[in-house]
Image (spheres, helix red, strand yellow):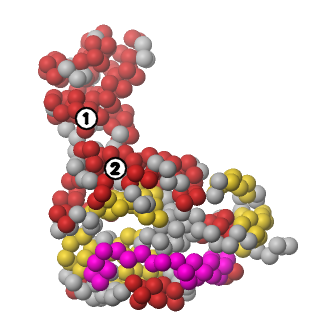
Amino acid sequence: MNPATREYIRQKFADYYSHAPVFVPPSLRQREWGFISFDETSKVQMRRHMAFQSREELASYVRVTVPRHMYFSTAYYELPSAPTMNDKIWAGADLIFDLDADHIVQKVSYDTMLSRVKDETLKLVDMLTDELGFSKRSMSLVFSGGRGYHIHIRDLEIREWGSSQRRELVDYVCGIGIDPAFMLTSHEGRGGGWPARYRGSLREELQCIRDMGMGDGVKYLSSLRGVGEGSARSLYAEIDAVIASVDDLSSQVFLMKNNAFRALIGDDYDPLKRRILSKAALTDEPVTTDVKRLIRAPRSLHGGSGFRVTELASVADLESFDPLVDAVVDFGGNMVSVECPFSLTMPMMGQVHTIEKGVNRVPDEMAVFLCCRGIGEITAPDS
């Protein structure tokens, strides 16, 4: 990022923070805060171990320093500004789920990425409410400003949970540690949850093998570790009945005796694992288990996109939320010259922008996005 680009972004952020209200989480005085600045000469990547006593004090600090990134702790501390974690004296933490594109989808356009992450967020919300008993009223849903969403749960009952208890929740939503025998014999399968998802995945895999045809299907099954041609033929000959009986608890003893079937549900069989993974909610596991995490503050600007970290009014608003409209800040709408190293197409504010390789004239909102993403540099109009 050249000096002109960095100063352009910093000035746009300064204009925003000069009038935008700051976000104040519950129990402000117990939160640690951290900031990353625009000063690339500084050896300190993040200034943290900070605390504020009031909204006014926090707002004044933000207006004066103009941070590029702004975070607060999910944890509550007795002394949040203490210089070491031990000295802070931990007093609990919110439960956080972080859905980020890094864990969900790779090498797609930015708008496609955001759509895919939204689908995963909706899936996780359903799991948390329908299967784990959390109320949507207890959740705060936040667009991260970059590539995903954060779910904050601030129930007092879970505030003092340690990492191991939070780990159990992560394992559940991510489908970690699934026991095939339990999945196939649990009476919960007809009611939903992981038994139903597991059996659905197994049916899909069996149907895929059936569709190979007798010759290729037997050959495929025989190629699995520990499977002979006899077991492969036996399973394939009855594959329609097997597919139909996946939910029939009385048939599981017979199925478990077939080596080919056992291989399909074994730890070494990746195709079924991938199907199961597609039904999991792909949250970032370390974020949930970390009871001393810093997380982006709503209403702050994301230094990697220029978008507003946006708290939704309710979980029900997620379906209609469009980050390429609802999280875009009005930076003035002036036309700015930005040089890009390659061409791309980017929707924003209901318009599709075609960016060519070289110098482009784009509105401020698009210029801030391109520059923050590191794919654009501010340049003179006639350069």
Range of residues picked out in magenta: 5-31
Rendered location of residue 48, percent (x, y) = 38, 83
- Please, what is the three-letter code of the amino acid marked with disc 2? Val
Q: Which amino acid does label 1 sit on?
A: Gly
Taking depth in this image into account, of 49 and 236 the one nearest to the observer is 49
Whether residue 182 is in magenta: the answer is no
Q: Residue at x 28, y 17 (%)?
A: 244
Q: Which residue position holds label 2? A: 125
x and y percentages locating residue 97 in the rendered image = 33, 59
Q: How crowded is mark 2: few (under 14 residues within 10 Å), some or many (20 or more)?
A: many
Does residue 253 appear left or right of residue 62 in this picture?
A: left
In the image, residue 36 above or below residue 112: below
The C terminus lies in which quarter of the figure? bottom right
Q: Pointer 1: residues within 10 angstroms few (<14), some, or many (20+)?
A: few
Q: Earlier in the sequence, mark 2 or mark 1?
A: 2
Q: Residue 192 bears which disc, if any? A: 1
